[in-house]
Image (cartoon, rainbow, N blue to C red):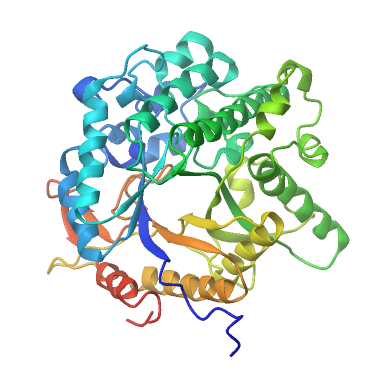
Amino acid sequence: MSTLIPTGFSKQFKWGSSTNAQQFEGGYKEDGKGLSIADVRQAVGPTVSETDQAAGFDDFKAASDHYHRFKEDIALYGEMGFQIYRFTMAWTRIFPNGDEAKPNQAGLDYYDAMITELEKYHIEPVVTLYAYDLPVHLLEKYNGWMDRQVITDYLHYVKTVVTYFKGRVKYWVPFNEQNFLPLDSHYMAGYHAKNNTEIFRMQHHFNLSYAQATVLVHQIDPDAQVGGNIGNICAYPMTADPKDVELTDELMKKVGYGPADVYFRGKYSPFYLKAFPEADFDQAIQVGDLDLIAKAEPDFMSLTYYMSSAISAASFNPNNGMNGIKAPNPYLEKSEWDWTIDPYGFKHYLEDFYNRYQLPILILENGLGARDTLTANGQVNDDYRINYLADHIERMREAVEDGVKLIGYLTWSATDLYSTREGFEKRYGFVYVDKQDQLKRIKKQSFYWYQHVIETNGQDLTH
């Protein structure tokens, strides 16, 4: 084979996994931490939904207790051979109310200790700075992301942590899946948007914050890299009917290409603005805003992928929130939660975004949620997860050999944590957290499998 065609993953390719503070840390009021919208999920918004109740959001307060067990958890990541690990910082650990002049030193000390532990095992940190955990105080003070003041407060937080950890964090991601805000503003921002004007207003404030955070990171730490995050599906038309094709295109413009044009090209594309019908853009966009967005120069794309969807004009409802993107495909299997399992969709998604934006990609999340069973002899046999990941890694390798530039691959998730809508019933990790035995950590079968995958740099996916 020609030397012009890559073979497998490069020696520089990085393997690891991800977690998220609000779903994993616990310790919600400890050492000066303030309340975030994740800590009071049931108390925020117009109503308490059935999914809120079923997920037991009060348990986000304890989650997997990583706050007290981070050394134990990171030692397991070191044993698996992680080269990279993504976690999120909780804004309210650094600024309990979100708008203090000076940070909470105990919060900085916690993440300092975490990063020190990662360094001990030669694991590079990837830090996401916002993942659905706005300080409650800012929601009460000015409706959070509805007000431009949130940009100032967020950037003060960003400047503080990037300065404090300069030289120790190479990869920064300002927001987690900020493109999904129009699908669930209540969950992501704590505010239930009433119309498209309000949705766009919050999205615009996210975008301005992202763009200026990107500039800040480069100013403070020129050796660090920063990338916007797109959470997405691979959308197929159900048939060759032009109505199905058109609806698929429109969906990708709204949740894929439109937001990505903002993050990776620094502009609002007209087709993206059309995804907010009847919105009053002048209410949000002020003089100079578009110039600020254009100044963002990201170093990479951080992408998440779990499933594909088959779009039918006869049945698809684009206004059905997050559930609206879970359109079944009769040719593919799906998880218990109706997430279509589609390894080829992963390859298609990677090649689509790389060819469009020509930026290297860091896979921030990819994984399978399932009801894992702890056997009588204390084992978790999760062949289904291994099969899912192996098939997706194989397709990822094919994308690399087609010319896609990948920095690394982070699964979701490193350790079991609270799923955003299904609580602990839906698990993703390589490490089982036993809720019936003081949150004991138990290595799953997939733990040893992924350890071998990393050892072989993805060459051997058997188990």
Measuring from the top left, give residue 155's x and y in whole percent: 48, 23
Number of numbered callouts drawn: 0
Measuring from the top left, give residue 404's x and y in whole percent: 60, 67
* Residue 49 vs residue 423, the one in the foreground: 423
Q: Quadrant of residue 263?
A: top right
Residue 268 shown left or right of residue 116 in the figure: right
Q: Quadrant of residue 24?
A: top left
Is residue 82 visible to us here? yes
**Vertical side of 308 occupied by 182: above or below:** above
Q: Residue at x 24, y 50 (%)?
A: 118
Outermost residue, bottom side:
1
**Vertical side of 115 occupied by 154: above or below:** above
* Residue 37 vs residue 451, the one in the foreground: 451
Identify the image quadrant of the C terminus.
Answer: bottom left
Is residue 26 visible to us here? no
Measuring from the top left, give residue 403's x and y in whole percent: 61, 71
**Vertical side of 72 occupied by 200: above or below:** above
Outermost residue, right side:
242
Outermost residue, top side:
141
**Vertical side of 429 occupied by 385: above or below:** below
* Residue 1 vs residue 317, the one in the foreground: 1
Q: Residue at x 54, y 20 (%)?
A: 151
Residue 337 shown left or right of residue 100 in the figure: right
Identify the image quadrant of the N terminus.
Answer: bottom right
Residue 168 shown left or right of residue 196 in the figure: left
Measuring from the top left, give residue 320's x and y in whole percent: 65, 41
